[in-house]
Image: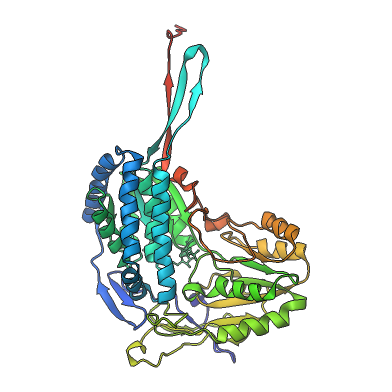
């Protein structure tokens, strides 16, 4: 991570929230105020084993229920979340530090996801295949068993919902481990599922960090692991899962390109660039952090983007007017990765006026200009509110530069030329391409990566396939033909 780079003082100093200093895994930090939020006891092998066993017995009951029955329980869970959205959103702000405006959207996306998969639960079906002599075969779509979900800190409630909703719809149980930095709201989701009527243990939450995560991935009764987090941890999860031949979904990091052509509608492109970079303090895996702008419109684009970035209200995330809250991290470190890039605004520690928030982790959003493709800020994921802007001249050139990365989570293009838009979408190597927008997430639409950004998908109909398996039943209607 960038925090590992040598620290030198530049004339133009840039501060980012250090990623190295994670709080002790049994302690969660209150990001907005820099105080300890709660003490959690990390689950050891006994607790992990207990949770997986209780999930397994719940799975036995749940998977035998009709899809329509599971749907009713899930719809009730969605209803409860919708009813309590303000309360849960407030807890999410305290848990994570993001603004209340964004937390409300996250909670809404969470209940929509549960509602969507409730709708699919009754549609699970197989195929009937006719064979010679009146024989036939049919396929059954069956649950996998106990699935493990491991979440990152940036969308705690939403990630728990995105993983559990398709899992439960297909008849599985889930043991979920939230990030030790944001341990609170997954527990609220577990309580809501219980209240809605799922069998005891169907959605269990275990607390802890890497050790607990390892125990989950290695447990022989686990059928699948769905992971959201960094590339290095994702590789470890895949390795551990491979030993037990467990299925894996990996939602990893990104350094997504956003291509802004001179024929775009500039006002929307500017809004798109802000949405692509500054949601959740820039801590979004699919952020379009490499903003390629066609040279002719670069000055106008930068003028607008910088003006609006400077106007972003940073501070107390519980206030309605705040647009950027607190980041994770336990200290602010000066990091020099500029290598000649120009800080047009922000990138500094921000201290809110409220004395209660003085110890919190705030940073002013930053725009970097004069960037080159081989700079660290352009190549590596920063996971903070830092937008790197790069000029380009031609379509072919910018596609080649945009694809020159090991990541492939998302991408975006702003243009009014309809053919160009679809041509660019076809040629960008990424799991998602947004045309004339960025970072919207309708739950009906699959989400996931190419290349090192992972595989498998979340959301959309296709995710049913990642949480179920196919059984083929072959039926003979005549005599057995015997070769012996
Ligand atoms: N694709 C996506 O949807 C997202 C990707 N990310 C990526 O994750 C990075 C930072 O997020 P972090 O939470 O710090 O990621 P991380 O990879 O450190 O942790 C993610 C989760 O994995 C757990 N974990 C850590 N070591 C483990 C191990 N050996 N075995 C099993 N579980 C383990 C953690 O406790 C946490 O719950 C970002 O830089 C970004 O690249 C983050 C959020 C969303
Ligand atoms: C909701 N959305 C699309 C902004 C981000 C979801 C992916 C993540 O967990 O970072």
Left or right of residue 231, residue 305 in this image = right
Relative to 406, say whether 310 is above or below: below
Position of residue 86 in the picture relative to residue 482 (left or right): left
Q: Is residue 420 left or right of residue 251?
A: right
Is residue 20 depicted above or below 118 in this figure? below
Q: What residue sits 29% from the left and 37% below the top?
A: 64
> In what quadrant of the picture does the C terminus appear?
top left
Q: Residue 101 location, x and y as percent?
A: 43, 75
Up-down: is 180 above or below 58?
A: below
Quadrant of the rendered structure where residue 107 is?
A: bottom left
Residue 282 at x, y percent in the picture: 50, 74
Q: Nearer the viewer, residue 413 or 44?
A: 413
Identified at 31% across, 69% down, the residue is 25
- Residue 318 image position (x, y, % from top left): 37, 80
Q: Tell me how many marks there are.
A: 0
Residue at the spot x=59%, y=90% of the render? Answer: 12
Is residue 209 in sight in this rendering? no
Q: How is the image coloured?
A: rainbow
Residue 121 in the image, given as x and y percentages of width and height: 39, 44
Q: For residue 200, say whether it is visible.
A: yes
Q: Nearer the viewer, residue 465 or 235?
A: 465
Q: Residue at x 36, y 74 (%)?
A: 93
Q: Nearer the viewer, residue 291 or 111?
A: 111
Closest to the observer, 118 or 145: 118
């Amino acid at each position: 991570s960038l925090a590992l780079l040598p620290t030198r003082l530049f004339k133009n100093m840039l501060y980012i929230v250090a990623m190295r200093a994670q709080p002790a895994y049994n302690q969660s930090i209150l990001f907005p105020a820099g105080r300890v939020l709660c003490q959690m006891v990390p689950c050891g092998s006994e607790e992990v084993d207990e949770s997986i066993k209780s999930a397994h017995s719940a799975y036995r009951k749940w998977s035998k229920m009709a899809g329509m029955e599971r749907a009713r329980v899930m719809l009730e869970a969605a209803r409860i979340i919708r009813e309590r959205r303000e309360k849960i959103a407030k807890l999410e702000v305290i848990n994570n530090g993001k603004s209340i405006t964004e937390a409300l959207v996250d909670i809404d996306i969470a209940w929509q996801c549960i509602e969507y998969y409730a709708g699919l639960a009754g549609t699970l079906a197989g195929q009937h295949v006719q064979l010679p002599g009146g024989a036939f075969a049919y396929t059954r779509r069956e649950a996998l068993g106990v699935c493990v979900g491991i979440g990152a800190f940036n969308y705690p409630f939403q990630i728990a919902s995105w993983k559990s909703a398709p899992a439960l719809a297909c008849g599985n149980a889930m043991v979920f481990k939230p990030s030790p930095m944001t341990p609170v709201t997954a527990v609220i989701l577990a309580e809501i599922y219980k209240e809605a009527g799922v069998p005891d243990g169907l959605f269990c939450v275990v607390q802890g960090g890497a050790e607990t995560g390892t125990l989950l991935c290695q447990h022989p009764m686990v059928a699948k692991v769905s992971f959201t987090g960094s590339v290095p941890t994702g590789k470890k999860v895949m390795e551990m899962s491979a030993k037990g031949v467990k299925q894996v979904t990996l939602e990893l990091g990104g350094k997504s390109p956003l291509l802004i052509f001179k024929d775009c509608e500039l006002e929307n492109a500017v809004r798109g660039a802000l949405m692509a970079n500054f949601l959740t303090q820039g801590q979004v895996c699919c952020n379009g952090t490499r903003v390629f702008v066609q040279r002719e419109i670069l000055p106008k684009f930068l003028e607008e983007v910088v003006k609006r970035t400077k106007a972003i209200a940073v501070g107390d995330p519980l206030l309605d007017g705040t647009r950027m809250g607190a980041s994770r991290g336990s200290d602010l470190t000066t990091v020099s990765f500029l290598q000649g890039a120009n800080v047009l605004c922000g990138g500094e520690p921000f201290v809110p006026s409220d004395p209660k928030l003085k110890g919190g982790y705030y940073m002013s959003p930053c725009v970097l200009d004069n960037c080159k493709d081989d700079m660290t800020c352009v190549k590596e994921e920063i996971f903070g509110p830092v937008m790197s802007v790069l000029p380009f001249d031609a379509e072919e050139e910018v596609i080649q530069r945009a694809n020159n990365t090991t990541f492939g989570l998302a991408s975006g293009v702003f243009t009014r030329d309809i053919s160009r838009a679809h041509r660019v979408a076809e040629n960008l190597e990424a799991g998602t391409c947004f045309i004339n927008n960025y970072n919207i997430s309708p739950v009906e639409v699959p989400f996931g990566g190419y290349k090192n950004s992972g595989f498998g998908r979340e959301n959309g109909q296709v995710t049913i396939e990642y949480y179920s398996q196919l059984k083929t039943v072959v039926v003979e209607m005549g005599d057995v033909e015997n070769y012996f």
